[in-house]
Amino acid sequence: AQTVTQSQPEMSVQEAETVTLSCTYDTSENNYYLFWYKQPPSRQMILVIRQEAYKQQNATENRFSVNFQKAAKSFSLKISDSQLGDTAMYFCAVTTSGTYKYIFGTGTRLKVLA
Amino acid sequence: DVKVTQSSRYLVKRTGEKVFLECVQDMDHENMFWYRQDPGLGLRLIYFSYDVKMKEKGDIPEGYSVSREKKERFSLILESASTNQTSMYLCASTPVGLNTEAFFGQGTRLTVV
């Protein structure tokens, strides 16, 4: 079975600073994908970034980047130049070749402070 | 603009009532999902469907059933609502594929009194 663990229930960061959200996962599959989703107060869940497990290079999307450590099964999200609009719940998720189900972590509530 | 639409944003029902939560997607996606979101527990999968009339249990199917008679519509049914089913319910859809983005509805906050 796949599991995803987010050990930081809540975090805060000053506007314009950098913050890193942690995620660890466990799967016995070799072929899988990792995702970070953002859920702002509006409740609309949106994709932030995705990473293919067989790619060594860390994915980046503008101010968002990941640190993917495959051996450690770690997939952290770095947000640079934090903005007030980044305030949201962030969920880490995995899908594997054994099943197409998304397995989500418990989420990290991030607050960006002015 | 792709869209997953849930029929209600807020819903209040009485204990013992039969409750229907409807979800419609306009992207011709094969896969559809129902999740329950609770504080500290994240998103937990209730049921998912990978084709019309096909369904599989997720991690917490007890007390729920689903129906998918048409590709675009996936319904979650609470046969006899109980107070412990008070929660946020999220519907999502994806096309076939491992790396595909999941598209979510805006959620239904269900309160059972």
Image (cartoon, rainbow, N blue to C red):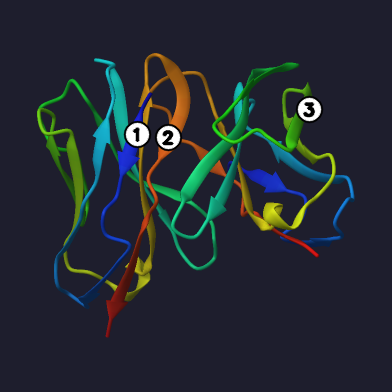
Crowd class of label 2 (few under 14; some 14 to 19; many from 20; radius 10 Å): many
Instruction: Give x and y (percent) for residue A35.
Output: 33, 39
* Residue pointed to by mark 3: B67
Whether A114 is drawn above or below A18: the answer is below
Asked whether the beta carbons under mark 1 and mark 2 sit within 8 Å of each other, the answer is yes
Q: What subunit carries mark 3?
A: B
Tell me the number on the disc at residue A103: 2
- The picture quadrant where one finds residue A52 is top left
The kind of residue on which mark 3 rests is: Ser
Instruction: Classify mark 3: helix, strand or loop.
Output: strand
Cβ–Cβ under 8 Å for marks 3 and 2 = no
Residue at 40 percent across and 14 percent down: it is A98
- The residue nearer to you, when weighing B60 against B25, is B60
The residue singled out by tag 1 in the image is A3
User: Quadrant location of the N terminus of chain B?
Assistant: top right
Measuring 71% from the left and 48% from the top, which residue is drawn there? Answer: B6
Residue B70 drawn above or below residue B81: above
Q: Note whether residue A57 is visible.
A: yes
Q: Say which chain tag 1 marks.
A: A
The location of residue A101, given as percent across then percent down, is 48, 27
**In screen coordinates, is A22 left or right of A100?**
left
Q: Secondary structure at mark 2?
A: strand
Could you say which is closer to the camera, residue B82 or residue B42?
B82
Q: Chain of mark 2?
A: A
For residue B48, what is the image quadrant? top right
Distance from the alpha carbon under mark 1 to that under mark 2: 7 Å
| On screen, residue A2 above or below B5 | above
In space, the residues marked 3 and 2 are separated at their CA atoms by 22 Å
Badge 3: residue crowd in 10 Å (few <14, some 14–19, many ≥20): some
Quadrant position of residue A60? top left
Give coordinates of residue B41: x percent, y percent.
Answer: 46, 52
